[in-house]
Image (tube, helix red, strand yellow):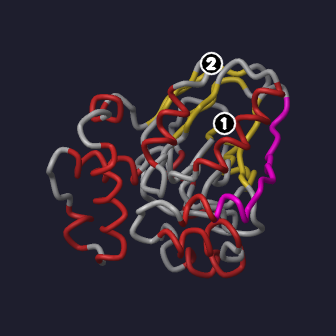
Amino acid sequence: MYDIHGNLPALEAVLEEVRRTGVNQIIVGGDVFPGPMPRETLECLLAVQIRTLFIHGNGDREVLAQMRGTETEWFRSAHESLRAPVRWTAEQLANSYEAVLAAWPADIRVHIEGPGDVLFCHATPRNDAECFTRQTPDDRLVAVFDGVRASMVVCGHTHMQFDRTIGDYRVVNAGSVGMPFGDPGAYWLLLGPEVQLRVTPYDLPAAGERIRRTSYPQADDFAARHVLQPPSEVEMLELFARADLK
């Protein structure tokens, strides 16, 4: 489950479906934050009665830096519309969960029956903020994945699912639970003998109302643009093409 971004209603819907599948392990692939219900989202994940492993994403890393009173290079240069959610999320978590976030690694390797050894990272194996999509040419990506000690790599970050081969590796993007690009819903990945890209429907109007009732600095916009009517894949693929690995 990647890119939850504090969308508790979406997470609750996915967890309900996950429990029905009988999985024995959950991987949370980064960017639990920032988002409109951060404390509630983290507490929900920590309370799950299934073994759960976390890695950090760039959003979690920025929130942790704010919790520690540190301004990163990204934070200093980012527009205030991007900084405000990070700052607010850090304030909601206060110091209670600093040690929890600090313990999350950048990536993990897990052996899974079927795929074999799987590397879970947030964006790419070399950092948590690089962007690539299903349309990024292979020749830009081969060096990024060269030397990865796994048969499969699972990532997120760009909030759009895909399943493609890059060099010797199968690379799967799990999509976004809480801020999808494309049709509304909560997107995630089920790994076992088969690789299943999943999407879970949930009560979008009710979720939007819960989010609007929070004090999140962009609550109305989050409900409208990330729950009720997300940006289209076509729109976002065009936007990400400008930030693609060169």
Q: CA distance from mark 1 to mark 2?
A: 27 Å
Left or right: 140 with respect to 22?
left
Q: Position of residue 20 (x, y in %)?
A: 83, 27
- Look at mark 2 in the image and give the residue it sits on: 49
Left or right: residue 93 versus residue 72 is right
Q: Is residue 39 above or below residue 22?
A: below
Q: Is residue 1 magenta?
A: no
Give residue 132's mark: none
**Element class at badge 2:** loop
Category of crowding for the residue at label 2, using alpha-carbon neighbours closer than 10 angstroms: few (below 14), some (14–19), many (at least 20): few
Quarter holding the N terminus is top right
**Percent coordinates x, y for residue 95 in the rendering:** 23, 37
**Hey, which quadrant is residue 235 in on the image?**
bottom right
Could you say which is closer to the camera, residue 163 or residue 43? 43
Above or below 205: residue 234? below
Label 1 sits on what residue type? Answer: Met
Q: How many numbered badges does the structure rendering display? A: 2
Q: Which residues are magenta?
A: 194-208
Direction from residue 38 to residue 184 in the image, left or right:
right
- x then y, percent, for residue 182: 73, 69
Q: Quick one: 103 or 210, which is closer to the camera?
A: 210
Identify which residue, 90 or 148, lies in the foreground. Answer: 90
- Neighbourhood count class around disc 1 (C-alpha, 10 Å): few under 14, some 14–19, many 20 upward: many
Task: Give the residue drawn at x 49%, y 46%.
Answer: 32
Q: Dot 1: what SS? A: strand
Point 51% across, 42% down: residue? 41
Amino acid type of the residue tagged 2 in the rendering: Gln
Which residue is rendered at x = 42% and y = 55% of the image?
34
Q: Position of residue 127 (x, y in %)?
A: 40, 49
- Kindly identify which numbered label has been placed on residue 152: 1
The answer to which of marks 1 and 2 sits earlier in the sequence is 2
Q: Residue at x 20, y 63 (%)?
A: 73
